[in-house]
Image: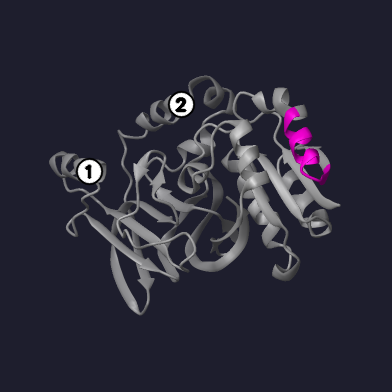
Amino acid sequence: MKRMMFIFNPISGKARIKTELFNIVNSFVSEGWEVRVHPTQAQNDAYEQIKNYGKQYDMIVVSGGDGTLLEAIDGLMEIEKERRPSFGYIPSGTVNDFATALGIPKTVKKAVEKITDGEATSIDIGKGNDKYFSYVAAFGLFTEVSYETPQNAKNALGRAAYFFAGMKSLANIKPYKMTVKWDGKEEKGEFILGLVTNVDHVAGMKTKYNENSQINDGLFEVILVRKPKNMAQLSIMTAEMMSNKLSEEYFLKFSAREMSFESKEKIKWTFDGEFGGETENMEISVMEKAIDIIL
């Protein structure tokens, strides 16, 4: 029989996955899968389970939010590529940007159907210093909101929790002086927000400016928001971001396989909405077609 490990976060989102557990497992078993079910017990449990036991299975299916997804990606990347199992994802978190970008249904029943009926598609994975991420690495304005907002607030308010928590930081926009290097190019500047992404939306904001980019082309897209000189400029920049018409005057944007961000102060990064570390030098590279996800 085909062997599957199904890992789910019992408190993700509004914990609705627990009420669907029988239907999920029954659907997989009826398709010929031998299923091991594991509810996560603590932070990094999904990572440890996949890292230690993942190579024994043909497929790993994970249900949870962006944090659980990130743990799963980390665990899969610890397995040598030739033994790395295929991956299925059932989103149950608050925002689920990754699922939206890949067209994974938000309802449990439809997501399970996609896994049982779908085909494997290879996707790129990012690596920032010694950590992995699936769809976005970011620093600056608003980026700390996702991992600093309590889980119960996320469950109760959904996207509104991110919005209200973010509003508290608007009064103090902090610029970061840094040197950015990519493909033999270099630019120094002050930036209030940086996004390195493999998807077309992050937290509801459109991030893809290159319509030819793909999720498995070996390139990540970068958007850096320059420091505004006054509130009038900030207003213009906000309008440009909302309309996805980013001018060179206010934004630095490019696509690259490898890039670095150097600063004289430590900068906090977030990977897939979770804390990604604090460092003066972030080296990011793209691991092309690293994971096979069922879509």
Residue 274 is labelled as none
The secondary structure making up most of the magenta span is helix
Q: Does residue 24 show up?
A: yes
- Residue designated by label 1: 243
Q: Tell me which numbered mark, 2 or 1, is placed earlier along the sequence.
A: 2
The x and y percentages for residue 110 are 59, 35
The x and y percentages for residue 294 are 62, 52
The x and y percentages for residue 267 are 45, 54
- Residue designated by label 2: 161
The x and y percentages for residue 4 are 79, 48
Tell me if 71 is positioned left or right of 171 in this view: right
Q: Does residue 64 show up?
A: no
What secondary structure is marked by label 1?
A: helix
188 shown above or below 67: below
264 shown above or below 39: below
Numbered range of the magenta stretch: 23-35
